[in-house]
Image (cartoon, rainbow, N blue to C red):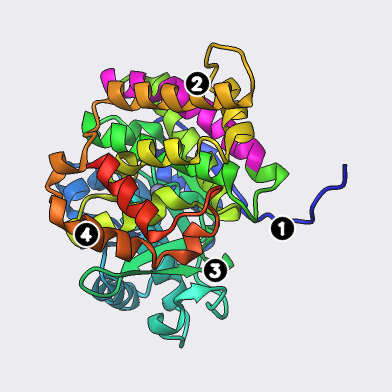
Amino acid sequence: MTMNSFEFRTVPAMEMAWGGANRLGEIVAARFAARSVLLVTDAGLVKAGMIAPIASSLEAAGFSVAIFDKVVADPPEIIVYGCVEEARQAAADIVIGLGGGSSLDIAKLAAVLLSSEQSLGDMYGIGRVQGARVPLVLVPTTAGTGSEATNISIITTGETTKMGVVSPQLYADFVLLDAELTVGLPQVHTAATGIDAMVHAIEAYTSKHKKNPLSDALAREALRLLGHNLIAACKEPSNRDAREGMLLGATLAGQAFSNSPVAAVHALAYPLGGHYHIPHGLSNALMLGPVLRYNAQAAAPLYAELADVLGVKGSGDATARSEDFVAHMQVLMDESGAPRRLRDVGVTDNSLAMLAADAMKQTRLLINNPAEIREEDALTLYRQAF
Ligand SMILES: [Zn+2]
């Protein structure tokens, strides 16, 4: 069998270390010559006392440390500008993003804009970033977005619209995976972000155009880790094995979908974030069930393989195994404790048509879905999720 040509990119270096964030100073000092760091995070983590020991570790290793802690969920452009301004004032020569997906996304753009004449508006789209950036280190505190391993930043540009910057410069130089940072996540966040990571693996594995042997290998291992650890991480928050399995799984899924892009679950999830400010992970968790059922036939051979990856019991042909896979995912989602219906998170019946119309604008994602989705199909899927 001939192999399709493909390209694969990812971050050049990662370290997985329980408690590693407390040694961030020595870890980063050994790898980079820069000594003036801008730490990009959110006020919640500062308040929770998670940032102070990390900043101390950096200072003890000889860094001057400025902290930008104004990152919010669904960050608008003004947060990017504020972050770059802070970095300029601090004469930062290295940027460290530490937090959820939003903090990592902002850190990526700050590292690019800090040494660039290009405007942010010029960077939206694929491959539009020009020139080099300052060194960039990412440290995720959730096991979900996989942003630490992707070349994507998502920014809110209007009332309900988001735009993405997708460029190789957004791959970090170094990623620290310290699953101890995820121990304090409440169950519902652990569940929703963990399911989002599973969506990344599933959609990368079934992606229609850029699926390739490397993204497949990463997606399979990601799904195996996530599927085996989700419930334990939700029910036993300080279970180290479960937390490490989830974080590694989310990062591997990020590596996969950065090369083999996500599809309809994300296309239908984005309007929920835009109109209702439902967090990214939860939006995806809410839409996964209906989209899996919708795709089950078109993606049957691949879903059947994923049933094996998850160790789902059963035998039969691809169609039967595909159904086993979908049923298993439903059970995992039910047990995780994540909200399961749109109506439970404030979505109203009369907005479903608007959401469906909005989802159709996500052509960049919809083209990757194994089965075609028209506007009336999107509406049906929202109704099923309602
Ligand atoms: Zn996602």
In the picture, measured across the screen, residue 285 lies left or right of residue 222, that is: left
Label 3 and label 1: CA atoms lie apart by: 14 Å
- The residue that disc 3 covers is 167
Frontmost of labels 1 and 4 is 1
Find the magenta span and give its range.
Answer: 216-237
Instruction: Give the distance between the C-alpha atoms of the residues marked 1 and 2, in whole angstroms.
Output: 32 Å
Using the image as rendered, state which of residue 235 and residue 331 is in the foreground. 331
Label 3 secondary element: loop
Identified by mark 3, the residue type is Ser
Identified by mark 1, the residue type is Glu
Q: Which residue is mark 2?
A: 324
Q: Is residue 326 magenta?
A: no
Q: Are marks 4 and 3 in contact (CB under 8 Å)?
A: no
Query: Residue at position x 57%, y 79% from top?
Result: 131
Which of the two labelled residues, at mark 1 and mark 4, occupies the earlier sequence position? 1
Q: Amino acid at mark 2?
A: Asp
Task: Provide the major secondary structure of the magenta segment.
Answer: helix
Can you tell which quarter of the image residue 193 is in?
Answer: top left
**Amino acid bearing label 4:** Val
Q: Quadrant of the C terminus?
A: top left
Q: Is residue 15 left or right of residue 361?
A: right
The residue pinned by badge 1 equals 7
Question: Which element type, helix, strand or loop, lies under badge 4?
Answer: loop
For numbered disc 1, what is the local secondary structure?
Answer: loop
Q: Is any atom of residue 83 visible in this view? A: yes
Tell me the distance, in whole angstroms, between the alpha carbons under discs 2 and 4.
39 Å
Instruction: Classify mark 1: residues with Cα within 10 Å, few (<14), some (14-19) or many (20+).
Output: few
Report which residue position mark 4 lands on: 72
